[in-house]
Image (spheres, helix red, strand yellow):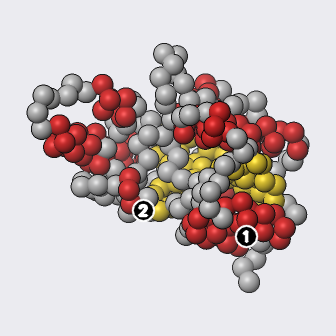
Amino acid sequence: MPATDNTISMNIVGAVRNGGSALKETIHRIEDFSKRVGQYSVIIATNDNTDDTDQTLSEFANRCAEVHIIRLDGVISDISERVERITAARNSILETLEKRGRDNHLTLMLDLDGPNICLNPEAVLAAAKRSEIQWEAVFANSRPAYYDLYALRCRGWCEQDVWQQIHNARKPLFGRQKWRRNLLKTMIHDRQFHIPEDCQLIPVDSAFAGAGLYKTQALRGLRYKCRDEENRLVCEHVLFHQEMRTRGARLYIDPALTTIAPQEHLGEGSGAPFPPNLQDLSSGAT
């Protein structure tokens, strides 16, 4: 059995609805990983499930006293936008963390519906123990391509909300289906690069790709939002990380911390080689 690292204490948190078999696989990974750290707690927020997610979560909590389930049933009828529901769920997790007053040094936020079915405990531990640079958060690198442009803000790569850009693009009178397919390829799939796992940390203003490891202290007092100053819907991670950056946080993609890209988020052009100019950014991380 792998050794336990008693120097690491961690909150493992996530939100899920209708997680299905992927949730069960991810829970198995969390259980394996929890044996590798000295102290841990698990907090999962869920709402309005129509599959066996409630049963899966109840069984998990029954097996382990360190698991706390937040049930937000009814949210789906009160909040119409999916991103707003996720925002509410993530905020319930942050509120619970602060109320419980646990002093776990790190917080690992996971998507529980697929990207982490192959969560690698060694990669998480390696990320947790990185000391060559100062960091407040590191985010996953998805395989076979970095898919999560919605949450990404990185100079020279993805500096704006790609979905707002697509929504605002001038539509042709004819051939809209082909036009949209080409637009998605240009705006999204052609920028979903394959990042080698041995690449250096990549400094970003925001990212996620299914997993984020945070210094817990850097989260104190913050809450997620998904509406910008013009009341436009945006990724909840972007505004959250913007607040972290305002407080001086240093954020990176850790190429060795890998998740699995959901196939439905990829397309023609996904997986192109990571551009040299972005590798230059990573080599300058401090």
Q: Which residue is drawn at 25% across and 27% down?
A: 169
262 relative to 28, above or below: above
Describe the element under mark 2 as helix, strand or loop.
strand
Q: Name the residue under label 1.
A: 31
**Residue 239 percent location from the top left of the image:** 56, 29
194 relative to 149, above or below: below
**Residue 176 percent location from the top left of the image:** 17, 37
- Using the image as rendered, state which of residue 1 and residue 64 is in the foreground: 64
Count of numbered circles on the image = 2
Q: Residue furthest bottom?
A: 1
Q: Name the residue under label 2.
A: 143
Q: Residue furthest top?
A: 230
Q: Earlier in the sequence, mark 2 or mark 1?
A: 1
Residue 228 showing in the rendered view: yes
- Using the image as rendered, state which of residue 54 and residue 70 is in the foreground: 54
**Residue 35 percent location from the top left of the image:** 77, 71
| Local crowd size for mark 1, using a 10 Å CA cut-off: few (<14), some (14–19), many (≥20) | some
**Residue 251 percent location from the top left of the image:** 56, 40
Decide if residue 178 is on the left or right side of residue 67.
left
| Local crowd size for mark 2, using a 10 Å CA cut-off: few (<14), some (14–19), many (≥20) | many
Q: In which quarter of the image is residue 42?
A: bottom right
Instruction: Give how far apart the Cα atoms at labels 2 and 1 are.
Output: 23 Å
Describe the element under mark 1 as helix, strand or loop.
helix
Q: Residue at x 44, y 47 (%)?
A: 148
Q: Which mark is residue 267?
A: none
Instruction: Report the amino acid beneath label 1.
Output: Glu
Quarter holding the N terminus is bottom right
Instruction: Report the amino acid beneath label 2.
Output: Arg
Q: Residue at x 63, y 40 (%)?
A: 76
Q: Residue at x 48, y 40 (%)?
A: 151
249 relative to 28, above or below: above
Q: Nearer the viewer, mark 2 or mark 1?
A: 1
